Image (cartoon, grey):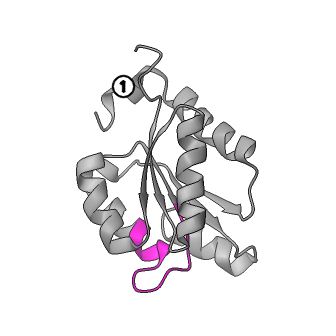
Amino acid sequence: MSPREPVLRVLCVDDNRDCADTLGILLELVGFDACVCYDGVSALAAAETFRPDAAILDLTMPGMDGGELARRLRERPWARTLPLVALTALSDEEARRRTAGAGFDLHLTKPVSPDRLANVLADIVILRGDSFLAIGH
């Protein structure tokens, strides 16, 4: 892999455009390829062509919330093992149970430090090792 190739493709979904855009910019600054969407329907469509290696989803969005988006992503054969990170303002135990029930791998509470988020995503790359190159590519 050349130094210019993105290490990880990340789908970022948040109905707050400023949050989503900022997250996408931060991820690209650390070398990831980010696809930013503002709702669940457009995220599902984008995911089919972008084929992310991980997804960061807001929970409370109008229309299709992050839990439903996670469930629908998990229905796709290529996304059954896709790491899903909930990034939300909801920090109570009920929200954590909902994210676990929807198939999320991790629940992070806003605001999250850019370093912590980058480290979480870097861990995904490390844990996948050589298998990363075969998944979703």
Asked whether 13 falls inside the magenta stretch, the response is: no
Percent coordinates x, y for residue 114 in the rendering: 71, 46
Q: Nearer the viewer, residue 4 or 45?
A: 4
Q: Residue at x 44, y 20 (%)?
A: 4
Percent coordinates x, y for residue 47 in the rendering: 31, 55
Asked whether 63 falls inside the magenta stretch, the response is: yes
Residue 105 in view of the camera: no
Q: Nearer the viewer, residue 72 or 5?
A: 5
* Farthest-out residue, top: 2
Q: Nearer the viewer, residue 99 or 32?
A: 32
The amino acid marked with disc number 1 is Leu
Which quarter of the rendered picture does the C terminus lie within? top left
Residue 130 in view of the camera: yes
Q: Is residue 46 left or right of residue 21?
A: left
Q: Residues within 10 Å of mark 1 (few under 14, many from 20)?
A: some
Percent coordinates x, y for residue 30 in the rendering: 60, 33
In the rendered image, which residue does mark 1 sit on? 133
Q: Residue at x 44, y 29 (%)?
A: 6
| Range of residues picked out in magenta | 57-70
Q: Quadrant of residue 45?
A: bottom left
Q: Residue at x 61, y 34 (%)?
A: 123
Q: Is residue 76 left or right of residue 88?
A: left
Tell me the element at label 1: helix
Percent coordinates x, y for residue 67 in the rendering: 48, 74
